[in-house]
Amino acid sequence: MKTITTLLPIKYPIIQAGMVWVSGGKLAAASANAGILGVIGAGSMKPDLLAEHIRKAFSLTNHPERLAVNVPLLYEKSKEQLETSLKLGIKIFITSAGSPKIYTKWLKEQGAIVIHVTSSPELAKKCEEAGCDAVIAEGFEAGGHNGREEITTMVLIPQVADAIKIPVIAAGGIIDGRGIAAAMSLGAQGVQLGTRFVMTAESSAHQNFKEAIKTSTPNSTMLMMKKHVPVRLLRNPFFDEVKKLEEQAAGVEELIKLLSHGRAKAGMLEGDMINGELEIGQGCSMIRDCPTVEEVVNKLLSEYEKTISVLEKF
Ligand SMILES: Cc1cc2nc3c(=O)[nH]c(=O)nc-3n(C[C@H](O)[C@H](O)[C@H](O)COP(=O)(O)O)c2cc1C
């Protein structure tokens, strides 16, 4: 099977997703050490802080080539984030939340590998046209910001795989080795996992957030704020506030006002379970432990092998 291990300098075709407030230098370095791509989530970082996280990650791994930076393009400092990362030696970029046309050509001229996140086959084609090396096709189940189309991973991956020739990396709802085998069967050449890596010893998610995930149920999350920026949230009093505003048909300005109090940082990093925003994927209720990244990767690989051996007998 052709996997992204030929495109990326990694041992296993797994990407630890870039995640605001959760994936700093420590998590990315632990992922690189475990043989997968470690991604620093720059979305919540000013360029100086991003530089600190990149330096920290370099100091914690002997595999700097397995480090990448995720830059959501809606942030006004995204160009500075890309320049800072390039200057410090990052060569792999995962861009999201914006057009792949903006920076792909320029990044390629700098010798970088560019992977863009897509939530539809149409956008995947645009990524290919823009010169991206691969796409991450992210389904409706995913944690964090999400496409408006609400296409599930099961339906998205085969259609993206049929629409383009560059490699497809599946994301959204993949929690264990069974999920990886399913994604590969659907035509993906690799997987990106976010929610699973929130629940690791090296993630910077607050302990309160982690404890809430341990007791979550299959309906604990919902895609909210579709009028503004769709995001999958864990139910808590902040979630209720958003829901109430949406039921009252509040405008985008009111939603922006609600979010403008640093709610994501308060929830995910500082553990404010009342006022904080908690971004997490639908698969969170499949996770009841918080091991090290190395333990997670080893478990994913053995579950994948077990699934494949069952499928072979089928
Ligand atoms: C807490 C959290 C924060 C996230 N932040 C970002 C982000 O800053 N940029 C981005 O492109 N995706 C972000 N995502 C989405 C992930 O990169 C990934 O695609 C997604 O988590 C995959 O689905 P899963 O959570 O079901 O594994 C975030 C996801 C989570 C759970």
Image: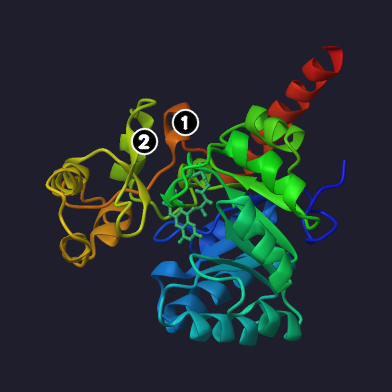
Q: Which residue is mark 1?
A: 287
Say which quadrant the C terminus sits in: top right
How far across and down, in percent of the image, does residue 142 sit?
Answer: 48, 44
How far across and down, in percent of the image, does residue 110 sit?
Answer: 72, 85
Q: Is residue 140 left or right of residue 62?
A: left
Which one is nearer the viewer's eye here, 127 or 271? 127
Q: Is residue 11 left or right of residue 76?
A: right
Q: Secondary structure at mark 1?
A: loop
How far across and down, in percent of the image, does residue 300 sit?
Answer: 66, 34
Instruction: Using the image, determine if residue 168 lies above or below residue 297.
Output: below
Q: Which mark is residue 8?
A: none
Query: Does the residue at mark 1 contact the one at mark 2 (Cβ under 8 Å)?
Result: yes
How far across and down, in percent of the image, does residue 198 sit?
Answer: 46, 46
Q: Which mark is residue 213?
A: 2
Tell me which corner region of the image, top left, top right, bottom left or bottom right, holds residue 59.
Answer: bottom right
Amino acid type assigned to the residue bearing label 2 in the image: Ile
Whether the residue under disc 1 has CB within 8 Å of ligand 1: no
Q: CA distance from mark 1 to mark 2?
A: 7 Å
Q: Is residue 38 left or right of residue 145?
A: right
Residue displayed at 47% across by 33% down = 283
Which one is nearer the viewer's eye here, 297 or 236? 236
Residue displayed at 81% across by 61% down = 7
Q: Secondary structure at mark 2?
A: helix
Is residue 149 among the parts visible in the rendering?
Answer: yes
Whether the residue under disc 2 has CB within 8 Å of ligand 1: no
Q: Of marks 1 and 2, which one's residue comes earlier in the chain?
A: 2
Residue displayed at 56% across by 81% down = 82
Amino acid type assigned to the residue bearing label 1 in the image: Ile
